[in-house]
Image: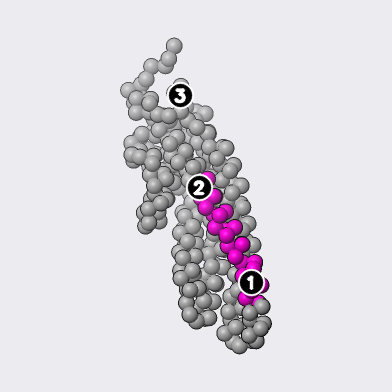
C-alpha cells in the first residue's frame, strides 16, 4: 500500500529518485588531484622561465646559451601545458556532472521553492561573466538545502537560513582569482619586452599556487556535500 501524500508533498512527488553522489564524487577527487599534480609540476618550470627572462634581460646569456636554454624550457613546458589543460578540462567536466546531480537531488531531498531550472547547474559555468557568480549561488543552494537537520519538506525561508562555511567562500574566491591571474598572465606573456613577459610568467606561477589551494578545498567540499546529501536522504520520511 502506498503512503498517501501530505498536502505539502506533491511539490516533490514527481521528482526524480535520489541519486547518490559517491561515484561521481570519487571521479572528481581523482581528476582534481591529477590536475593539481600537473599544476604542482608546472610551478618550478614557470619560475625557471621567469628567471630566464630576467637573466636574458640583464644580458647574462650569450646568444647561443639563450637559444639552448629556451629550447630546453620549451621542450619540457609545452607537453606539460597540454597536460595541464587536458587535466583541468576533464576534471571540470567531471565536477559539473557531479554538481548537476547534486542540484537535481534537492527536490527529492524535500527542498521546495527552489529557483527553476536544473539546467542552470551546467549553463551557469558556460556563460561569460555569469560564470563568475551564478555557480557559487547554486553551490550555496545545494549546501543549504542538503542539510540533514532541515524539516521535511523544507521551505525556502528555512533552508535559506543555513550557514555556508567560510572555506566554501575561500574556495570560490581562489578559483576566480586563479582564473583571472592565468588570463592576465597569458596576455602579458604575449608582450614584446622581457620585463612584461616575466611578470606574466610570475602571474602564472601565482595562479598555480592559488589553484592548488582551490583544488584542496574543492575536494573537501565535494566529499562533504556528498556525505551531507546521503545523510539527508537516509532521514527521508517519503518513499
Contact between labelled residues 2 and 1, with CB atoms less than 8 Å apart = no
Question: Over which residues does the magenta segment extend?
Answer: 69-94
- Which label sits in the foreground, 1 or 2? 1
Earlier along the polypeptide chain: callout 3 or callout 2?
Answer: 2
The span from disc 3 to disc 2 (Cα, nearest Å) is 33 Å
Mark on residue 73? Answer: 1
Contact between labelled residues 2 and 3, with CB atoms less than 8 Å apart = no
Residue 75 lies in the magenta-colored region: yes
Find residue 128 and report its horizontal and vertical position in percent.
Answer: 37, 56
Which residue sits at x=66%, y=83%?
A: 64
Which residue sits at x=64%, y=62%?
A: 41
Residue 156, located in which quarter of the rendered image? top left
Query: The residue tagged with tag 2: helix, strand or loop?
Result: helix
The span from disc 1 to disc 2 (Cα, nearest Å) is 30 Å
Mark on residue 93? Answer: 2
Identify the residue under disc 3.
237
- Residue nearer the viewer, 53 or 156: 53
Contact between labelled residues 3 and 1, with CB atoms less than 8 Å apart = no
Residue 167 visible within the image: no
124 vs 171, left or right, is left
Residue 67 lies in the magenta-colored region: no
Residue 99 visible within the image: yes
The span from disc 1 to disc 3 (Cα, nearest Å) is 61 Å
Find residue 86 and report its horizontal and vertical position in percent.
Answer: 56, 54
- Which label sits in the foreground, 3 or 2? 2
Amino acid at each position: 500500500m502506498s503512503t498517501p501524500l501530505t498536502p505539502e508533498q506533491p511539490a516533490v512527488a514527481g521528482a526524480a529518485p535520489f541519486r547518490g553522489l559517491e561515484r561521481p564524487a570519487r571521479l572528481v577527487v581523482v581528476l582534481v588531484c591529477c590536475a593539481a599534480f600537473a599544476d604542482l609540476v608546472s610551478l618550478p618550470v614557470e619560475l625557471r622561465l621567469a628567471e630566464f627572462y630576467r637573466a636574458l634581460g640583464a644580458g647574462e646569456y650569450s646568444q647561443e646559451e639563450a637559444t639552448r636554454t629556451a629550447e630546453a624550457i620549451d621542450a619540457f613546458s609545452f607537453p606539460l601545458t597540454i597536460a595541464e589543460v587536458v587535466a583541468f578540462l576533464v576534471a571540470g567536466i567531471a565536477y559539473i556532472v557531479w554538481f548537476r546531480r547534486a542540484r537535481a537531488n534537492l527536490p527529492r531531498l524535500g527542498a521546495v521553492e527552489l529557483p527553476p531550472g536544473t539546467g542552470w547547474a551546467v549553463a551557469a559555468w558556460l556563460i561569460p561573466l555569469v560564470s563568475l557568480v551564478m555557480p557559487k549561488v547554486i553551490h550555496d543552494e545545494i549546501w543549504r538545502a542538503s542539510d540533514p537537520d532541515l524539516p521535511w519538506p523544507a521551505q525556502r525561508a528555512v533552508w535559506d537560513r543555513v550557514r555556508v562555511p567560510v572555506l566554501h567562500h575561500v574556495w570560490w574566491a581562489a578559483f576566480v582569482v586563479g582564473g583571472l591571474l592565468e588570463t592576465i598572465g597569458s596576455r602579458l606573456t604575449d608582450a614584446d619586452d622581457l620585463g612584461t613577459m616575466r611578470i606574466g610568467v610570475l602571474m602564472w606561477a601565482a595562479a598555480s599556487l592559488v589553484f592548488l589551494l582551490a583544488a584542496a578545498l574543492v575536494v573537501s567540499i565535494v566529499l562533504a556535500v556528498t556525505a551531507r546529501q546521503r545523510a539527508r536522504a537516509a532521514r527521508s520520511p517519503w518513499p
